[in-house]
């Protein structure tokens, strides 16, 4: 699958990497280890996988608003996703990406066409996603 | 979202890292909420002070930010996880104390007002009616919109902090008159409906079913204490940011709130027959509420531990007026500038159940501290605990 898809740009910047796709929401506080950049919630479909330098795709965040600071910590540790795509974003993800400078978009046309492992470019400033 | 030249420059880092960060937060939240532009605010209130809520990651973020940033409008802050003038009370461990102190120092560097309360509108932060503000702490932002006639969205710790630094907030949602109209009205079908517990139960019920502005009909005007309980409970169970009481309703959907609904919410929050300790002050008590407690106690004594949470300012005023002395003589303890929920104090008490009049405290203490709750109005609690 190749193409350019329009999106709503929420946090400025350009990020690229392999797509890592989750159909379930993520709680950054309880579900992600900011030291390793891995999903540590055993009940989560991405359990054990690294989000480091990936384009992380999930519906929205759940759980504690402290999750925003976990995104900041991931970035400080050099273990953050290179960009995030949400179905419909939320305060926690937006403010976390804003302080961590992680490009963020949501409401992507054709989001369901994106498969795990595809190489993506996310433009949070102008609001689009390119699949290579 | 439109940014003027100056705001663009700040976003591009021309005025330093802190303003760049603050404008990144505001422009991103602005896009999320479909704001057209930023507007000036007259005050901010910041949450995210207790080490129990923001932890090490939040602490590190604030320590970095506060090295070269200051707030630009009057800004109050939420309670901490302990009373920083008496940090070692209740056997709080040394690491917790030192990390909490670092957070408090960071906020002091940001030049916030020394409020450390969830009720900043009682003696600290009260702009004129109609002012746009940026308040976090759900109970306070709902109170601001619904009781004080201020205009604020339900801000997060980070968005309120960004607004405090820039003096601006996205023009969206509850800042816009047309978006402050209730979409659903709740008719109270209960005779003699009064007291903090009843108003809290109503708020807990309503918050779960309505995301936007709501209306309450056929209800008495709440006293300040009842209004605080109502706001805190709405903030606890849902996302709504305001309500109106007995207003003129156009065609909006109506639902009833009956004795049966009241009982169901009560059964959800109340899971103990009695409390082995008493927690009052969620939200923080004001001087009038402390006075009322003193009057109810009279010259009796507590037969169990009673903790009362308030700002230091309220405590000192109650001290000057003699109310605090009477309550302390009865055996209760005041804990200033500390949150009744997000603190190690409650779990360090070593009790299995707690009596409180707060639905917000009931919800969080059960989940965070794993302690059972007996929910009762303050006069009933004191009637059975003072001899």
Image (cartoon, coloured by chain):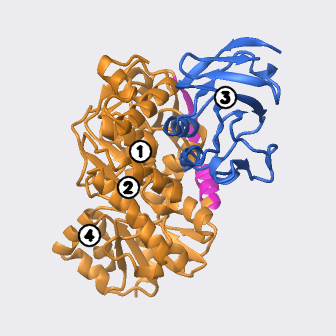
Query: Mark 3: which secondary structure?
Result: strand
Q: Quadrant of residue A112?
A: top right
Numbered circle sitting on residue B315: 4
Chain letter for orange, please. Answer: B
Point 55% across, 47% down: residue:
A76
Estimate how packed mark 2 is, as few (under 14), some (14 to 19) or many (20 or more) residues with alpha carbons within 10 Å: many
Q: Which residues are magenta?
A: B252-268
Mark 1 vs mark 2: same chain? Answer: yes
Q: Is residue A131 above or below residue B127?
A: above
Mark 2 or mark 4, which is nearer the start of the sequence? 2
The tag earlier along the polypeptide, 1 or 2, is: 2
The percent position of residue B44, horizontal first and vertical second, equals 32, 42
Give me the disc on residue B156. none
Whole-number angstrom distance, CA of label 4 to CA of label 3 = 48 Å
Residue B245 visible (yes or no):
no
- Callout 1–callout 2 Cβ contact below 8 Å: yes
Q: Which residue is mark 2?
A: B78
Q: Nearer the viewer, residue B232 or B253?
A: B232
Q: Is residue B59 above or below residue B136?
A: below
Q: Chain of mark 1?
A: B
Please name the residue that numbered disc 3 is placed on: A85
What chain is tagged by disc 4? B
Q: Secondary structure at mark 1?
A: loop
Q: Which residue is labeled 1 in the image?
A: B136
Instruction: Please state the horizontal and vertical placement of residue A101, each as a whole percent of the image.
Output: 53, 34
The alpha-carbon separation of the residues under discs 1 and 2 comes to: 9 Å
User: Residue placed at 82% from the left, 43% from the top?
Assistant: A45
Pair 4/2: label in front:
2
**Which chain is in blue here?**
A
Query: Pointer 4 and pointer 1: residues touching (CB < 8 Å)?
Result: no
């Amino acid at each position: 699958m190749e193409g350019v898809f329009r999106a709503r740009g929420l946090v400025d910047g350009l990020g690229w990497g392999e797509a890592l796709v989750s159909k379930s929401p993520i709680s950054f506080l309880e579900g992600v280890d900011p030291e390793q950049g891995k999903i540590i919630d055993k009940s989560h479909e991405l359990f054990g996988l690294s989000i480091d330098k990936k384009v992380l795709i999930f519906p929205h965040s759940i759980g504690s608003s402290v999750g925003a600071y976990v995104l900041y910590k991931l970035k400080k540790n050099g273990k953050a996703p290179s960009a995030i795509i949400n179905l419909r974003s939320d305060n926690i993800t937006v403010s976390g990406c804003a302080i961590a400078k992680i490009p963020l978009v949501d409401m992507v046309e054709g989001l369901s066409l994106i498969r795990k492992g595809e190489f993506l470019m996310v433009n949070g400033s102008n609001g689009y996603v390119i699949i290579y | 979202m439109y940014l003027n030249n100056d705001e663009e420059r700040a976003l591009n880092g021309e005025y330093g890292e802190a303003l760049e960060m603050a404008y990144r937060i505001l422009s991103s939240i602005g896009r999320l909420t479909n704001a057209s532009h930023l507007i000036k605010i007259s005050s901010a209130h910041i949450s995210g002070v207790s080490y129990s809520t923001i932890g090490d990651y939040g602490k590190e973020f604030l320590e970095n930010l506060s090295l070269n940033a200051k707030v630009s409008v009057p800004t109050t802050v939420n309670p901490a996880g302990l009373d920083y003038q008496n940090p070692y009370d209740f056997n709080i461990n040394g690491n917790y104390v030192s990390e909490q102190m670092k957070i408090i120092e960071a906020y002091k560097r940001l030049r916030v007002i020394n409020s450390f309360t969830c009720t900043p509108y009682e003696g600290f932060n009260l702009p004129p009616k109609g002012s746009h503000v940026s308040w976090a702490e759900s109970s306070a932002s709902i109170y601001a919109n619904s009781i004080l006639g201020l205009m604020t969205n339900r801000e997060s710790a980070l968005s309120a902090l960004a607004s405090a630094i820039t003096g601006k907030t996205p023009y969206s949602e509850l800042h816009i008159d047309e978006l402050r109209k209730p979409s659903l009205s709740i008719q109270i079908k209960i005779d003699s409906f009064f007291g903090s517990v009843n108003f809290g139960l109503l708020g807990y019920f309503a918050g779960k079913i309505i995301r936007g502005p709501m209306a309450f009909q056929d209800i008495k005007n709440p006293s300040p204490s009842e209004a605080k309980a109502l706001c805190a409970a709405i903030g606890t169970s849902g996302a709504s940011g305001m309500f109106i009481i007995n207003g003129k309703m156009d065609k909006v959907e109506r639902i009833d709130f009956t004795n049966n609904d009241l009982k169901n919410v009560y059964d959800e929050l109340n899971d103990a027959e009695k409390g082995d300790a008493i927690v009052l002050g969620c939200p923080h008590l004001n001087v009038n509420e402390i006075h009322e407690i003193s009057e109810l106690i009279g010259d009796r004594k507590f037969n169990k531990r009673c903790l009362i949470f308030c700002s230091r300012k309220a405590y000192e005023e109650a001290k000057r007026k003699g109310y605090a002395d009477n309550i302390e003589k009865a055996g209760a303890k005041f804990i200033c500038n500390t949150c009744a929920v997000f603190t190690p104090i409650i779990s360090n008490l070593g009790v299995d159940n707690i009596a409180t009049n707060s639905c917000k405290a009931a919800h969080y203490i059960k989940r965070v501290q794993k302690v059972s709750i007996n929910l009762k109005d303050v006069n009933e609690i004191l009637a059975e605990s003072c001899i």
